[in-house]
Image: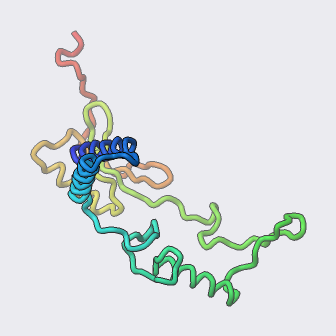
Amino acid sequence: MNHAQLTALGRALRVLGEHGDALGSDTPDAKLQEVKADLKRALAILEDTVSGSAPTTRCGEHPNGPIDESAVDLCLLCETRRRSARRSEQNGDYGQHRPTNPESATPERTMSRYGVRADRPQPQQRWLPEVWTGQVWQLCGTPRRDRLEAERYLSAERRGARPGIAYRLVHEFTDYEVLRIWGTPVKVDIEPMGNL
């Protein structure tokens, strides 16, 4: 719904609200005809504004999903999930419920399928292509997972139309280690006259 449609719909609904406040048992037919025309106008604006289809279920997650007449929210997908959960609960597939009183029994600790923090692998290694800007080393490309790919990228950069003064390849794992440097990084004064 764009802003113009929203404004027009809001105006039409406010007019209908004013009509509703003014209605009474002695309202003349001419006034009712005016209300009818305004109501038709508001419905026409609403018809132009609505782009999607009307929801088929009362489910917030699957409003246009398949219908199951026996489900509370008419959603077949959610009802299938609920039936599966009830079946699992009846068949004893769920684990034991936690005790309501924590002192009565200590809950058993189960191993997580993801392991504990100490068992997790270290960060993946990456190779960072960097260029010397005259002042600092700056990342000049996307960090790569493959060292050969990073070296090929730096070779292409050195052969490019505007190569840098120097390039280097940095290995990132848990720490940084400079693997290789191409060229000589020379400190360049950023002042054009050499700070005279």
Quadrant showing the C terminus: top left
Residue 141, visible in the rendered structure? no
The percent coordinates of residue 71 (x first, y second) are 52, 80
Tell me the residue at 29%/47% (across/down): 28
Q: Is residue 44 above or below residue 168?
A: below
Question: Quick check: 101 left or right of 23?
Answer: right
Of residues 182 and 154, the one nearer the viewer is 154
Question: Quick check: 84 left or right of 34?
Answer: right
Q: Is residue 83 above or below residue 189?
A: below
- Residue farthest along the left direction in this orientation: 161
Q: Is residue 143 above or below residue 183?
A: below
Of residues 1 and 48, the one nearer the viewer is 48
Of residues 156 and 86, the one nearer the viewer is 86
- Residue farthest along the top direction in this orientation: 196
The percent coordinates of residue 77 (x first, y second) are 46, 79
Tell me the residue at 40%/69% (across/down): 63
Question: Quick check: 83 left or right of 108?
Answer: left
Q: Is residue 180 above or below residue 121?
A: above
